[in-house]
Image (tube, rainbow, N blue to C red):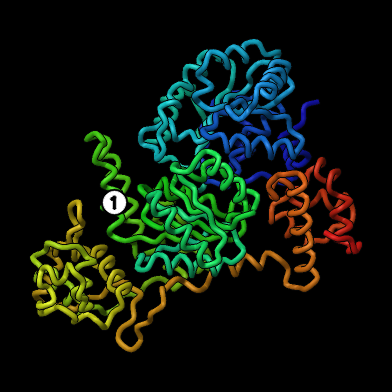
Amino acid sequence: MAKSPEQVLKSVFGYKEFRQGQKEIIQNVLAGRDTLAVMPTGGGKSLCYQIPALIFEGITVVVSPLISLMQDQVGALLENGVDAVFLNSTLNLEEYKKTVRAIKSGGSKLLYLSPEALATERVKSILREADVPISCITIDEAHCISEWGHDFRPDYMEIAAFRNEFKSAVCLALTATATKQVQADIIKNLRLKNPATFVASFDRANIFLNVQPRTDGLAQVVEFVREHKDECGIIYCLSRKEVDSLSLELQARGISALPYHAGLTDQERADHQNKFIKSQVDVIVATVAFGMGINKPDVRFVVHYALPKSIEEYYQEIGRAGRDGLASEALLLYSAGDIHRIRFFFKDKSEDESFKAEKLLQAMIDYAQCRTCRRKFLLGYFGEEYTPREDNSQCCDICEQGGLPPQDVTVPAQKFLSCVYRVDQRFGAAHIIDILLGSRNEKIKKFNHNFLSTWGIGTELSKQAWFELVDAMQNAGLIERVGEWNIVKVTSLGKELLQNRDKIELPVRIEFGAQKKASLALPKKKAVLHKKAELQDDARTTILYENLKAWRKKLAEEENVPPYFIFNDKTLIEIANNKPSTRADLLSISGIGELKAKKFGTKIIAIVTDSGEEY
């Protein structure tokens, strides 16, 4: 008798209940209805096709954009006792032949392929000759098929032709980020037939959203990473040069970090990614080339060292943190200079492409500069209304401070506006701030701006506070930054307030004069502190958790797999808290299915009951 989705969920994957949307998506797929599912990274998209694959008679073909993603998914499935394979360039001839035999004989339930491989006659021929039909075609990262998506890949356009040949297969398209426009493109370009569309909540409540002006980027990153000591994280940079420089700086300060970008050799990239996945290195400093294929559940933080190109890109990247549901943090450091650097990439685009890119970038700028709840802004972008929780302090840096009440900034705002006029509205915010702080840098002296009446009159604020004020003034419509170089212009409203000497109150977090602090103003009420609360606060539980981690690490090294293939942190925490002493107790723990209970149960119970063995 065929098992139900609930039975497969528990017996194979060890989970007691479905996450939001999973059950409905699975039911539609099993009913043979084409389906589009938009679920956040870490929301459990994989189970939406893996569970049907174990119920269907035939094989499920999964279109995946990266080799690393295929390897990660197949490795985790094999650890759970599921027959899964991939066909890609990493296989030697014997491995390839063995895999083809498994596909043709129906010995594998899931086959992972790239969109490029899917289009080849050789792969189509293998699937035509298989003893079992293709029951399902799953397209992962389906936003790649839309030119409005943040990672458009022309090869995805070939999927529809493959689908047309295997008409009896149901089609499931999955993505973490898709606006209404992208959803429409996915349905159209994949030729989905009367699809059911599911859009889960985009709210990753366990990720603390933190956005700060980048004033001393290296110092800010070092401080942040040290506060996340012994935790895994990803730092995204705009350029390879920045990646190399930052990773070397972190290494020089004793931080376990490695670079990742397209300028490294294939072997170097594979080695660095492998060490990160296996928790042999804490931090990966990378360009956006890194992460799509990473299913590592215990990434505790994601840092953007500069402004991303779009909210879709930003959202997908921060979603790589906290996939296990434990508290994590996303820090974005930005400056106005980032905008110029990003626009430089638009130069070779067509007029239509530039228009799309500029629209996406502007939404990202608005998010970085918003003065209200960041989660509300972020979810609103994807068409979802956010209802604040009772304790919303762990939502974002603004809510952490109880919101930003208006503060009287009349005098510094007037100084800034006056200085803009004195340089004929021809310079960016950074240069104007340097004038106000009395800088004698070469650019200041070149234009004789050290002789202006506004030179040195703004020392009551720190440089970071000035940038904070500039963002608030732009958000309030007093100034605008225009052109390729983000030149500051005073708006008609700003001119009116300056001329009338009206009181100016803006929502900012700045301190004046004697209260001015030299700190980097990163929020101190860290979400990481609340993560510890997942573990019961007693000595025995803490020691048990550390022993379980030590055992997992040793076993992972012996089996040459990432530690999370065995159990993720959340499962170990639940074991430590509940202290199971029988196999039945073990099967009640989230993440422990029948195979893992059989394979690891005796050892886990021995550790829990403190047998005295070395771990």
What residue sits 74% from the left and 58% below the top? 549
Placement of the C terminus among the 4 image quadrants: bottom right
Task: Give how far across and how far down residue 239 sits, in percent.
Answer: 38, 49
Q: Which one is in front, 135 or 376?
A: 135
Does the image show residue 527?
A: no
Placement of the N terminus among the 4 image quadrants: top right
Q: Which one is in front, 269 or 503?
A: 269
Q: Is residue 249 above or below residue 102?
A: below
Task: Give how far across and how far down residue 15 sits, in percent.
Answer: 72, 46
Going by the picture, which residue comes out furthest to the bottom?
Answer: 514
Task: Give how far across and how far down residue 460 sits, in percent.
Answer: 26, 83
Query: For residue 31, which quarter of the picture?
Result: top right
Residue wearing tag 1? 341
What residue sits 16% from the left and 70% below the top? 444
Question: What is the secondary structure assignment of the residue under circle 1?
Answer: helix
Say left or right for 277 vs 607: left
What residue sits 20% from the left and 55% below the top? 485
* Number of numbered tags placed on the structure image: 1
Say left or right for 374 vs 501: right
Does the image show residue 609?
A: yes
Say left or right for 455 vs 137: left
Three-letter code, disc 1: Arg
Task: Give how far across and how far down residue 266 sits, in percent.
Answer: 52, 38
Q: Is residue 146 above or below residue 564?
A: above
Going by the picture, which residue comes out furthest to the right?
Answer: 611
